[in-house]
Structures are given as structure tokens and as C-alpha cells.
Image (cartoon, helix red, strand yellow):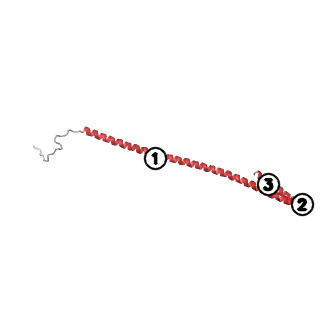
């Protein structure tokens, strides 16, 4: 209970007492004064209740806003972590693809080098007359 509610309750009770005394004594001024004080007390009490409700509503709103802000920050952090994870995954795939391509090129180079070495090692002396055909069929003699 806040001070407006307390003051309103006191004025309401005091006004009721004045009005009652005025009714018992037949004093209409006391009755009107008491009724006015009662109305004033009820209004003060209502004002205090409204202020208290507004303060409670404000406090609840602040708490809900704080919770919403915390959720927003958490969601943003989660999103950031997901994006970072996907970016790292993409980077890893890119590095793997580049490494695989480099390994393929190196293997191709080694194959070419090996083929050249084989050709050099197997370099045969040309046979006399090889590649120079007469166009005649030669039958071996016995």
C-alpha cells in the first residue's frame, strides 16, 4: 500500500464518521462535509491504486524487455557462431580442394617426369634401314 492509498483510506473512514455523526445529530452540513471527505478519500485511494498498478506494470515491462534483450543477444551469438562454423567449413573445403588440385598437378608432373626417364633409358639405337621400306616382301633364305 502506498501513501496515497493510506491517505485515501483515512479520509474515507473520517468522512464516513462525519457523515454518520451528521445523520445522528441532524446536521446536514456535517453530512455533506463527511460525504465530500469520503469521495475525496475514495479518489485518493483509487489514485494510489492506479499509481501502484502503473509502477508494477512498468517493472514487469522492464523485466520482460530485459528478458527479450537477453534472448536477442543469445540468438545473435548463436547466429554468429553458426555463420563462423559454416565459414570455417567452407574455408576447410576450399583448402582441401586446393590441396587436392596441387597434389593432382604434382602427380601429373611426376608421371611426365617418369615417362621421360623411361624414354631416356629405353632409347634404342636406330636399326639400319628401319623405317625405310622398299615395298618388297623379302623371304628369308635357307
Label 1 neighbourhood size at 10 Å, few (<14), some (14-19), many (20+)?
few
Q: Secondary structure at mark 1?
A: helix
- Of mark 1 and mark 2, the one earlier in the sequence is 2
Q: Looking at the image, is 10 positioned above or below residue 117? A: below
Q: Secondary structure at mark 3?
A: helix
Does the CB distance between marks 3 and 2 fall below 8 Å? no
- Residue assigned mark 3: 9
- Residue assigned mark 1: 90
Label 2 neighbourhood size at 10 Å, few (<14), some (14-19), many (20+)?
few
Placement of the C terminus among the 4 image quadrants: top left
What residue is drawn where x is 62% and y is 50%?
67
In the picture as drawn, the residue positioned furthest to the left comes out as 142
Please give the label number shown on residue 25.
Answer: 2
Is 12 placed left or right of 141 in the picture? right
What residue is drawn where x is 68% and y is 52%?
58
- Of mark 3 and mark 1, the one earlier in the sequence is 3
Is 132 placed left or right of 104 in the picture? left
**How far is the residue under mark 3 from the one under mark 1?**
71 Å
Is 125 placed left or right of 75 in the picture? left
Residue 135 percent coordinates (x, y) = 14, 47
Residue 111 percent coordinates (x, y) = 31, 42
Q: Looking at the image, is 117 positioned above or below residue 40? A: above
Q: Secondary structure at mark 2?
A: helix
Q: Looking at the image, is 88 positioned above or below residue 25? A: above
Please give the label number shown on residue 42.
Answer: none
- Of mark 3 and mark 2, the one earlier in the sequence is 3
**How far is the residue under mark 1 from the one under mark 2?**
95 Å
Does the CB distance between marks 3 and 1 fall below 8 Å? no
In the picture as drawn, the residue positioned furthest to the right comes out as 25
What residue is drawn where x is 42% and y is 44%?
96
Amino acid at each position: 500500500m502506498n501513501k496515497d492509498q493510506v491517505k485515501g483510506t483515512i479520509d474515507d473512514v473520517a468522512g464516513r464518521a462525519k457523515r454518520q455523526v451528521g445523520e445522528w445529530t441532524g446536521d446536514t452540513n456535517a453530512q455533506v462535509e463527511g460525504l465530500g471527505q469520503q469521495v475525496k478519500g475514495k479518489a485518493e485511494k483509487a489514485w494510489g491504486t492506479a499509481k501502484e498498478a502503473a509502477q508494477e506494470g512498468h517493472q514487469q515491462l522492464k523485466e520482460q524487455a530485459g528478458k527479450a534483450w537477453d534472448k536477442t543477444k543469445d540468438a545473435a551469438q548463436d547466429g554468429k557462431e553458426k555463420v563462423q562454423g559454416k565459414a570455417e567449413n567452407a574455408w576447410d573445403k576450399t583448402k582441401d580442394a586446393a590441396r587436392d588440385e596441387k597434389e593432382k598437378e604434382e602427380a601429373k608432373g611426376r608421371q611426365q617426369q617418369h615417362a621421360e626417364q623411361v624414354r631416356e633409358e629405353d632409347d634404342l639405337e636406330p636399326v639400319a634401314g628401319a623405317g625405310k621400306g622398299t615395298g618388297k616382301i623379302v623371304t628369308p633364305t635357307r
